[in-house]
Image (tube, helix red, strand yellow):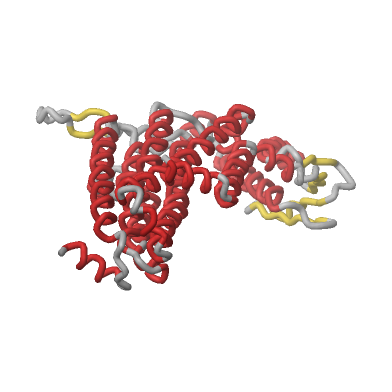
Amino acid sequence: MTTFKLTFFSKLKAKSFLITTLIIIAGLFIAFNLDKIIDLFDSDDEALTLEVEADESFLSAFEPTLQSYDDTIEIVEENGAAVLEVVNTDPLEAEIRMDEDISASQEESIRLALNETNRAYVVQTLGLSQEEIAQMYAEVPVEFLVAAGDDSGDFEAADADDMNVLNMVIFYFSVILMFIIILNYASQIATEIANEKSSRVIEMIVSSIRPTQHLMAKVFAMISVSVLQVLLITAGGLVAFYFSDTSALLDQFGLETNEQTMKIVVYCIIYVILGLVLYLSVAAMLGSFISRMEDLQQGLMPVTLLSMIGYFIALGGMSFADHIAVTITSFFPFFTPFVMPLRLLVNDTGHAPMLIGIAIMVATIIITLALAGFVYKRSVLSTESGIMKNIKRIRK
């Protein structure tokens, strides 16, 4: 407990812990109030008075269309800040003369309104009836069927696999958060262990405490700090979510919840915590092989490579979450925390794969901690200068 408390509180008071936590929580507050920030800078688009030089038929079709795209543009009869002149109606051509530049969004709105008006002109010249126009714009009904699983030869409606954008954002954030914290704390715990061995302080420590107890105290202290940081960030995110106008935010970006949203939130938190525990356990084991600080980066290379591979599989697989490659890699323990929640982006993924992934990770963590204790106990007093020499020494 002495080692645990010393390590835990020293890391808790570290500036890196405080600054990182505050920055991420501040980022969450910004993210949940992004609509207000955008509106603040978007009020930016000052009202534009637009004078239109065209006949009444064009104006009657163009004005309501333009208002549907951008209500900051007002059409006036004279003295407008910009003048839109219809140069030709067959085909429709126009030019805009401005006193000064207008915003890109206003330019795009005018362009879209002109295109829509042109389509209306073309339809009008064809002499189509209202029914024919409605039929031309109607969506083609199509039903996607998949073979039934009972070998009857019948077909049934296929499940909709469209990914929910909000769920993708939650998954994306959890993967990035886990990756950052893993790289940060894996380096810290390996540095702690290697520094003690290289400074010979460990010789005094193991004279009063078993090496395995000392290692586990440090490992669990670092795990506790990292988990506490995740919980603080989660709590900060919930507070930011509570005090923000979430309905306006979701509407602003077209985000909406579905039946998978709460499931993906819960499992992402679980897998982030288990991923931290697993990778910190591996980092502690690798740190046990190191007797000199010069070998630290080389010793941590497996943690860095594995976490990077899992990270890129997770982000790269977002567009095909139901692919067999994603399914297979989700059961590989070191990729599981990154890839398994990815499968929840597909609507037909149930609880069974998630629970299997959790069981695999718990078993791997237990084995890794046991192996770390075994390695540390045999190499704690080693003075060998190379990692491979320490590995050979442990095998003897």
Task: Answer left or right for 59 relative to 216.
Answer: right
The quadrant of the picture occupied by the N terminus is: top left
Position of residue 379 relative to residue 344, above or below, is below
- Given residues 74 and 243, the one toward you in this image is 243
Q: Position of residue 251 (x, y in %)?
A: 58, 32
**Quarter of the figure with residue 292:** bottom left
The quadrant of the picture occupied by the C terminus is: bottom left
Task: Tell me which residue sits at (85%, 47%) in the image.
Answer: 80
**Quarter of the figure with residue 379:** bottom left
Q: Is residue 39 visible?
A: yes
Task: Tell me which residue sits at (43%, 40%) in the image.
Answer: 224
Task: Tell me which residue sits at (85%, 50%) in the image.
Answer: 81
Task: Answer left or right for 134 relative to 274.
Answer: right
Position of residue 144 relative to residue 293, above or below, is above
Task: Tell me which residue sits at (29%, 43%) in the image.
Answer: 322
Q: Position of residue 85 (x, y in %)?
A: 77, 52
- Given residues 288 and 150, the one toward you in this image is 288
Which residue is farthest left? 151
- Given residues 335 and 115, the one toward you in this image is 335
Q: Position of residue 261 (x, y in %)?
A: 43, 31
**Quarter of the figure with residue 392:** bottom left
* Figure disc tally: 0
Q: Position of residue 40 (x, y in %)?
A: 74, 41
Q: Is residue 276 visible?
A: no
- Given residues 164 and 112, the one toward you in this image is 164
Which residue is farthest bottom? 385
Task: Answer left or right for 98 relative to 153.
Answer: right
